[in-house]
Amino acid sequence: MAAIEIAALRTEGIHCPLGLDVDRPRLSWSFGRPGDRGGRQSAYRIAVATSEERLKTGMPDAWDSGIVSTGAHTSIAYEGASLLPRQRYYWRVTVWDEQGQSSTGAAAWWETGMLSGDRWTGRWIGASAGAGGERRLVQLRRSFDVKGPVARARAYISGLGHYEMRLNGAKVGRRELEPGWTDYDKTVLYSIHDLTSRVRQGENAVGVLLGNGFYRVAGGRYAKFKDSYGEPACLAELVIDYDDGTTEKIVTDRTWSASESPLTFSCIYGGEDYDAGLEQEGWDEPGFAENDSWSRACELPPPRGKLLAQSSPPLAVMKRFPASVVSEPRQGVYVYDLGQNISGWPSIRITGPQGARVKLKPAELLTDEGLANQKYSGSPYELNYALKGGSIEEWRPRFSYYGFRYVQVEGAVPCGKESGGKAGLPVLHGLEGEMIYPDTPACGGFRCSDPLLNRIHENINWAILGNMKSIFTDCPHREKLGWLEQLHLMGPSVMFNYDIEALLDKIMRDMADAQLPSGMVPTTAPEYVVFKEPWHIFRDAAAWGGSYILAAWEMLQRYGSTGPLERHYDGMRRYLDYLTGTADGFILRAGLGDWYDIGPKGPGFAQNTPVELAETAVYFGLARAMRQIAIVLGKEEDAAAYASLAESIKQAFNEAFYDSSSGQYAEGSDAAMAMPLAIGLAPEERRGALLSRLVRHISERGWMTNAGDVGHRYVLLALARGGRSDVVYRMTRSTDTPGYGYQIAHGATTLTEAWDGPTVGKSQNHFMLGHLEEWLYGGLAGLDYRYQPGTGRFIVKVKPAVVGDVAWAEAWQELRPGKASVRWELGPGRTIAIKAEIPANSEGRIYIPAAQDAEVRKSGPEADYLGREDGYAVYRTGPGCYFFKYKNL
């Protein structure tokens, strides 16, 4: 049996991606469970071919890497022949272990997209003259014939702002809110759909519905902003490859027809209206006879942005929540409850007379009267549906979504209440919430014996999923903007649970597109809202723009992904140069600082920590990260310059903010004490006293922090790294002071915007304060990991924190090398048992919280004892499953 086995292959972080516009895609592979003799890779060989047959017969005509002696298995750049557009490439890898035994995995593939904007022959089309209008959306159609057996059929399509593609009467695929949101003046995404099994011999018909999305925010109801890149438009090429080797294209041009659609209003912020009485039955099917409402589509000016294949995971309806009626706060007004705050839209099943209208008003909270309360989530937002009459009708929005738990229904009566309702009203037979987020599987899990901690973990994850779209939004209703500080502050928490490598790669492009000529990276990307005087401070903040550097660095550490570092190095360098140019003696004087901390003025602007302190601390962290990035990329001179810059910032920081008389930084807020500890600004001789003071301040407040959006993560890191996870535990379980426990005690089902969100109002679906997730995995359960660029391998650290009344905890994650896991539990007589699983081609560091005189029994593969560190016995291991059991006297 092979000592190492290949389990999964990824191209640009994706399993078998359909459509990549990348000249040198990055290839990675993971491993199965290591064998008894361990399992470390010593070499690899990659073979790439243009057909599966060539690959099977050992004739790779695209690339043969030859045998490469290394343990690296992530982010291996393709170095073969120039890639062709619309070509599927098959690849596999053979690896050798340290004993010279080889193993070859199953084949995978990737398929290229157009690769270049000049290869498109279609035209951007939309409503013809006289169609469309301010509140009416367009639908497009075309019939075409399939003339013989089909080997392959693809649709390459972009519809701005959003589109729904239909073929022969049915929607194509599960994708929602396509394409992903971008700065359409810089980048326009298109998708590839496999239509091979969907087209049929003879006549076919393709239809496209268009929505405004972020491409055109015209207002009319609530809107965070009003702007437009142009009129809704579609570009598409349907390419049919026949068995006989010929190819046919059906492209968007003036041969398509256009008509007003039943969508009478569509706004990403304000909602959607649909009149089913305006539907034209069969419009997207063969044989449809167009009436006078149809005219030739007209060509529209193309968007300015570069066309690029969308390779990040598509959005889809991933969960459904049935709702039930909970109240009738006013006569004829019914409120439904999903039982969970979600991000998506309601779906209804209804019967009634033609032309009758039902209004849906989703909301996160209820007023005192029990009605939908949109005060903190953007009002008015509503969904209106006009019935066509007849049998049961099913409807849900297409191009607008919202964050909600409750749905207020007007104009219809619930099924079973017809006799008590107004005669002639439609009957609502069912309502459910459809939750939308990227179609990416969970890659990690956490559980422990404490029900409250498990519930906090769940709430944080609901908030993550609620704000994970084609960007990471701040909230799914009021703003829907990509505020960037979340990427690095919450990045590790998200990556413990979900594989977001491809999504982060897309967001890195968003940040590059948003970067100004000065080098500044604004606080949001895409930057749909440009904050000007007096709100300009919302545009330029190091903890936000700094995600351009820190997110890329985190991708390297978590995924071994070097591609973003190489592609964006110049932009990251320009951003750090910008900060240095605006600094005053290496101190950043402006920014947002520790946004949403806890103070007497309520949540909002930083109150406890000087903005200059927080911004400069992040500035120092950026300089240190850039030094590491430069080392990885072999830029030694840059690395030396960034090391010097970091030292200058550190010296200026301590001179400006450390008060030797009080022994604290600034006024001694939690963020002011924790950020120097966690980021590395505090000299070694001060660290013990600073940590003690931080703990004392938290305890004096009743185990409540006063840190906010930026500072809180560093508070948790400082405490955990300082051996005070017991303090984190006590802070977390408190239910009578603002915090996680307080939110749950007051009914929150997701993480809220403010620490006391359920009682103070504000958004009820934010993930910006979910940093505890990083501690639940890496602190309490004790599972963490980092990529080591020099070796190409991962080091998996297992370091449990046995605290409070927690009797057991466990965590697992699918890392790039394979599955890692840990479980610890307390036994009778104060015994502690730990099970740790280290994946193949990795190295383990297992920390056992055993007393000096404890007898540690271990089993599994060989483990080297390295000595003691901070109260832990430390072991170095290879891959395998390890068991430790001991008793502290």
Image: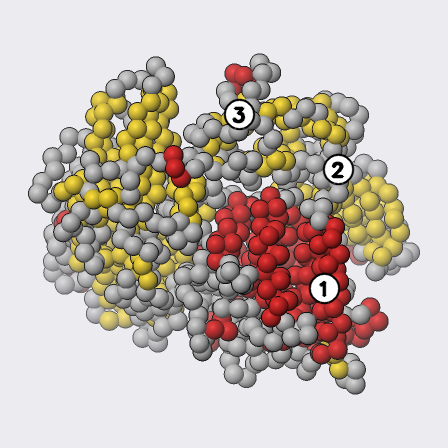
Q: Which residue is mark 2?
A: 879
Q: Vertically, is 680 above or below 260?
A: below
Q: Is residue 703 left or right of residue 434?
A: right
Badge 3 marks a residue whose secondary structure is strand
Q: Are marks 1 and 2 in contact (CB under 8 Å)?
A: no
Say which mark, if any, is on residue 562.
Answer: none
Depth check, front residue: 733 or 669: 669
Characterize the local packing of mark 2: few (<14), some (14-19) or many (20 or more) Cα atoms within 10 angstroms. Answer: many
Q: How many numbered tags mark residues here?
A: 3
Badge 2 marks a residue whose secondary structure is loop
Q: Nearer the viewer, mark 1 or mark 2?
A: 1
Q: Is residue 140 left or right of residue 820?
A: left
Q: Which residue is mark 3?
A: 90
Q: Which residue is mark 1?
A: 645
Depth check, front residue: 127 or 379: 127
Q: How did the renderer colour the structure? A: secondary structure
For badge 2, the amino acid type reads Pro
Answer yes or no: is residue 822 visible: no
Specify which label sits upstream in the sequence, 1 or 2. Answer: 1
Q: Position of residue 382 (x, y in %)?
A: 28, 62
Specify which label sits upstream in the sequence, 1 or 3. Answer: 3
Q: Are marks 2 and 3 in contact (CB under 8 Å)?
A: no
Q: Position of residue 625 (x, y in %)?
A: 68, 57
- Give the residue at x 16% y 41%: 296
Q: Vertically, is 139 above or below 700?
A: above
For badge 1, the amino acid type reads Leu
Q: Is residue 492 left or right of residue 719?
A: left
Image quadrant of residue 593? bottom right
Depth check, front residue: 499 or 823: 499
Residue sitting farthest toward the right: 853
Q: Nearer the viewer, mark 1 or mark 3?
A: 1
Badge 1 marks a residue whose secondary structure is helix
